[in-house]
Image (tube, rainbow, N blue to C red):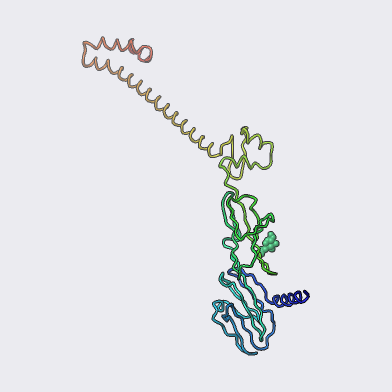
Amino acid sequence: MKTIVLFGLVLGALCAAGKVFIAEVGLKVTLECGFDRRQNVLEWKRSPSTTIWKILGKNGYPSKGKDPIAPRSALSNTHLVIKNVKETDFGTFTCFVDGKSNEHTLIVVTVPGDQNRVLQVGASDILECKVNSPGNRATVQWVKPGGLVLNSNKVNLNTVATSDKGIWQCKVSQEEATFTKNITIQIKEPDPEPTTPGLKKNPKSPKSENGNSTSGGGVGIWDEDSFVLLGLVWWVWVAIGAGGLIVIILIVVIVVIYKRNRRKRREFLRMKLSQKPKKYCQCVRQTAAAKPQQGRRREKPSALPLQPLLQE
Ligand SMILES: *[C@@H]1O[C@H](CO)[C@@H](O)[C@H](O)[C@H]1NC(C)=O
């Protein structure tokens, strides 16, 4: 029994030298070798067995290996620094220093989409935390703004609600390595109805808010967006006013034209009447005496100025 525990402790101590590193796609990660000093050889290899970097001899120059990571990486003391991490970079990395070695694990996390999102109530979205790890041993969770933990790497927000607002955290862990990525969600309220904002947002007087929202009450409310009177936005009143003005102008014009026409007709008639006798007098002498008399009688009530002339 004792030997098993001891064996376990020794194995644990050996394994502890190998570390787990978690990197996010596009960023930089530093893999620590675990041996800080070297006398002679330093080599970083990627499983199965491709060399990334190698130095031979105490004053030797580093030489680049054939692994696709090599061009994006550099040595820093005994550490391997990988820039612009790619999804396919995950795996097992071994560093060799003077005959000793440590096997490390690199996990790569991809969180597609924006880190800050503005979503409409009722919209849908997907929160994903893609994890590439050797043997898929990493644990992935999403922590909701309220603190609720979802044991999944993917969250389908089918109908976004106000309660979804806040920081969503993707948590990846394996052994003592942990990684957190925050996604901040802001919720946009749906656009309000065009006529309601003035009534809704009346800020300082709750009394008048009640009166206005129910009946309108004949009180106007100034608002940042619109002036509302009797439940109508200001420009509706302007339109009504302009329409009324046009109607009034039309009526005035019609009345003026009508009156002018009547006056002209009366004048025309008067002219005709005053000319007729002259014509008859000049041209047809026999009938001239009779016809004007009929005209005179008809005209009596309306054409007063003619009377004295006719009576003569
Ligand atoms: C994520 O959010 C938590 C709190 O909500 C904060 O403590 C933490 O620093 C944030 N992490 C990052 C990487 O921004």
Name the quadrant where ligand 1 sits.
Answer: bottom right
Count of marks placed on residues: 0
x and y percentages locating residue 214 in the rendered image: 63, 34
Residue at 63 percent of width and 53 percent of height? 164
State whether residue 78 is above or below residue 220.
below
Q: Residue at x 56, y 42 (%)?
A: 193
Q: Tell me the residue at 48%/34% (across/down).
A: 243
In the rendering, at what x and y percent does residue 303 appear?
Answer: 37, 15
- Which picture quadrant has residue 300? top left
Residue 143, image quadrant:
bottom right
Residue 55 in the image: x percent, y percent?
Answer: 61, 86
Up-down: is 287 above or below 141? above
Residue drawn where x is 54% and y is 81% of the image: 66
Asked whether, in this view, residue 264 is left or right of residue 187, the answer is: left
Say which quadrant the N terminus sits in.
bottom right
Image location (x, y in percent) of residue 7: 74, 77
Locate residue 310: give its quadrant: top left
Picture layout, residue 216 above or below residue 287: below
Q: Which residue is the extreme one toward the front?
A: 1
- Residue 230 or residue 273, whichever sits in front: 230
